[in-house]
Amino acid sequence: MADVYCLHFLWPYWGKAQHYTGRTKFTAEERIEVHRSGKGSKLVAYALAHGNDFILAYKESFDTQHEAMIREHRLKKRHGGVKGTCPICNKLKKGKQQTCSG
Ligand SMILES: [Zn+2]
């Protein structure tokens, strides 16, 4: 059991990056609790400390860590992969309110 998840930040938290793609052997929701407590990724902790916030854009569950790892790497490698699969960005684009990158 493993989850791959994508966090969509309210604004770019590090240069142009507005998404954080991660993988956990727990559920995405449990992992988010860790992020919010500041014990997860340093980047996420930094963003939260500076008044940014995030939404769980999507998650996928896999039977094995290996499958989740392959999916995570694909998302991170493909140019625009995270953006392209983020439902929040897609919604914003349709509404022409703002674009987001990263
Ligand atoms: Zn997004």
Image (cartoon, rainbow, N blue to C red):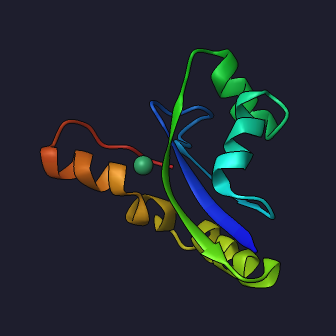
The one nearer the camera, 59 or 98, is: 59
Quarter occupied by the N terminus: bottom right
- Residue at left offset 57%, top offset 70%: 60
Q: Residue furthest left?
A: 95
- Image coordinates of residue 81 in percent, x first then y, are 49, 68
Above or below, comparing residue 73 to residue 30 in the picture? below
- Asked where in the image residue 25 lies, by quadrant, the reply is bottom right
The one nearer the camera, 25 or 79, is: 25
- Image coordinates of residue 74 in percent, x first then y, are 62, 77
- Image coordinates of residue 26 in percent, x first then y, are 77, 59
Q: Is residue 100 left or right of residue 6?
A: left
Q: Is residue 85 left or right of residue 52?
A: left
- Residue at left offset 69%, top offset 73%: 73
- Asked where in the image residue 96 lies, by quadrant, the reply is top left
The one nearer the camera, 48 or 17, is: 48
- Image coordinates of residue 23 in percent, x first then y, are 73, 62
How many labels, in total? 0
Above or below, comparing residue 94 to residue 24 in the picture? above
- Asked where in the image residue 64 lies, by quadrant, the reply is bottom right
Q: Is residue 11 left or right of residue 24?
A: left
Q: Residue furthest right?
A: 39
- Residue at left offset 30%, top offset 43%: 99
